[in-house]
Image (cartoon, grey):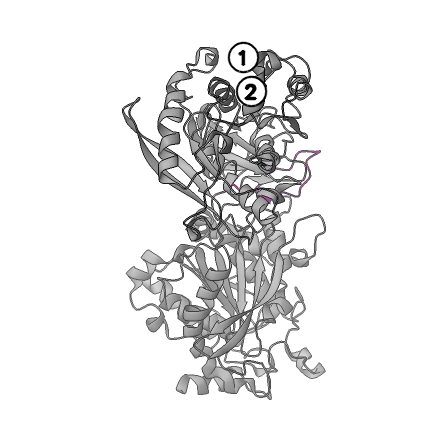
Amino acid sequence: MRCLVVLAVLLFSSSNLPAQGEPRSGAEQAGQESPRPNSRPNQNRPQPGRRGPGGFGGTIELGPDDKQIYPDPDDSIVAKREDIAHGKLEMIEYDSKTVGTKRKMNVYTPPGYSAEKKYPVLYLLHGIGGDETEWQRFATPDRLFDNLIADGKAVPMIVVMPNGRAQKNDRAEGNVFESAPAFGVFERDLLDDVIPAIEGRYSVQADREHRALAGLSMGGGQSLNFGLGHLDTFAWVGGFSSAPNTRQPEELVPDAAKTKAQLKLLWLSCGNQDGLINISQRTQRYLKDKGVPHLWNVDSHGHDATHWRNNLYYFAQLIFNDAAAKAALSPKTAAVEEKSAASETKPGSATSQAPKTPEGITEDFQPASTNQSGRAYPQVNSQGRVKFRIVAPEAKSVSCTFRDSTEFVKGEDGAWIGYTRPLDEGFHYYMIKIDGAEVPDPNSKYFFGANRWGSAVEVPAHDADFYALKNVPHGQVREVTFHSPSTNSERRAFVYTPPGYDLDSVKRYPVLYLQHGYGENEYGWSVQGHAGVIMDNLLAEQKTKPFLIVMTYGMTNDTRMGGIRDFDIRPFQTVLCEELIPFIDAQFRTIADQLHRAMAGLSMGGMETRTITLARPDLFSHIALFSGGSIAVGDIQDLDAFKKQNRLVFVSYGGHEVGGNSPRRGGDPQAATQGLREVGVNAHYYVSPKTGHEWQSWRRSLRELAPQLFQE
């Protein structure tokens, strides 16, 4: 209670200071800085011993550590830019067990938000006179984060702006200072209700390393109290102009060694015209004395929106970025930043460390969906170009395996920047070359392709909706192990079962056996190809019948590249026909006959499909070849029997693959398919527009194939 009395006396005297966000009188505006961004007080630094503006707070005494280490950015940081992608701001409700009612919070999701990715979360708290809308009114964080993410300065993150006044009437009305106790109650609401609600509704990384907590004024005190008090929940903490509700430093950090071990970043800031600066000063001096790493930024503002916006701008660039945070906390970096602040050098000026973008490249890059969580690079722009940023300060040369890429240029920060040519829509494997050695990009997720685990990048496609993860009924991709007597080994397969498979113990299903290509394995179709998601969406739209999909390793990769003509199909044919199919029919509820069995494959898997299905027409009634050859009338030994047994021959290619009589395709696939139709075979030919021998062609091929399967 004593703390709350002090709080009211120092910070919240209604005769001296209006509630945050409320208009001031002309006299008050003369005494205190307006919340207008980047406005300047009459004096850049207060006289020693003077009180804060308008008699607000206590006496201001600046010490040697009370310096501005980050320069004031200009107003463009919150300008709305039409040439970049934008995130989404939405007001949501959640059930608060702590308060016993439904409450609101404002949530920002970054550009390109996808349920297929998991995002870190910043919880951003308001002041005594605000609510869940205050940050948006004061700092427009949606624009600020859109711009930071577009410029590659911040990792894509979700920003949650809850109401820190945990009481049933949580509106900032009447005497807002009477609600001060509710700001303490919010500790339980945040931990027990807000965080679970966010993690249940959004695709987030639900661990301490991917949660940040920051706030302004009263919210700054909450952030220090709750964040440092729950380092098992938060690893990144920021207090901007923290109010007197901030606990004593000894309570905040009772065990300095433990705090140092758990905390990734602690940011403290205050304006040198803010009469509450002594609250942050005492915390900063204690942290320094105990050797707890932190950043302390004292600019020339007061207790106002400009200070909070500017410090959020810099704080956002460090959170969820270990390398950036460590660099900022290093003494060498701090000295450089302090010098920069003193000279008021703005980020992005001529002294910026980042190399200039080459001419002809559109600067609207966004982080790729295939990035590891929290990684801002690689990025993709509207031209289909990929921008890489590789930190390798000791390297002599850096490049990538994409042909016709630009030269990678090293910046003063040790990061190399390079760009690809415009790529086709869809998924592309690549590696980074550092001093001649090919290595995976540490920023990308890893995928198995080209006979190794390596990097890949997704170039957004105009038709990506058909493999987007949506709120529809979902099937399952199950991993099974089966014994193979012919190879004397335990082998693996993945099996897609449609939505509702386990709800009906009687219903039986057709089966599609779906093969990968050379250099890939049984992971390919469910991971790179999104086969399960494609099926879920088609079924939700009632465009296909439900069926199982079985994906196993095609035993392709022991064959050297260039020696595929010598590949012996017989071992795999035995595994598939004599071992896997009986296993699937025994373990799953299949319709175990030829009429309800199909086989398809891409590239070398298409070649396997062609060979096996023509050899075993008694097992498969539907055949599909994706970029894997074609079937001509002359390839069929008994045409009359084939016409009776076969229900579909499907052939597809990427648009960049076809044209001419290429031997690799066994002639003209369109003509071969037309020839089948002319003799009465149900044959279909599909070309994926503007793609080559790549996953986007094969994803589209599966989308086109599925509705044609098992149509009795």
Q: Quadrant of the N terminus?
A: bottom left
x and y percentages locating residue 559 in the rendered image: 41, 16
> Was residue 368 drawn as part of the magenta stretch in this picture?
yes
Specify whether residue 647 is in view. Answer: yes
Residue found 39% across the figure and 21% down from its top: 572
> According to the image, label 2 marks what residue?
642
Q: Earlier in the sequence, mark 1 or mark 2?
A: 1
Real-space Cα separation, disc 1 to disc 2, in angstroms: 8 Å
Rendering quarter of residue 26? bottom right
- Vertical relation: 579 (above or below) 537: above
State the SS at label 2: helix
Q: Which percent across, then down, holds residue 131?
A: 57, 75
Q: Position of residue 215 (x, y in %)?
A: 51, 68
Which residue: 63% across, 37% down?
A: 356
Numbered mark located on residue 637 in the image: 1
User: In the rendered image of this protein, does residue 86 appear above or below residue 664?
Assistant: below
Q: Which residues are magenta?
A: 352-371
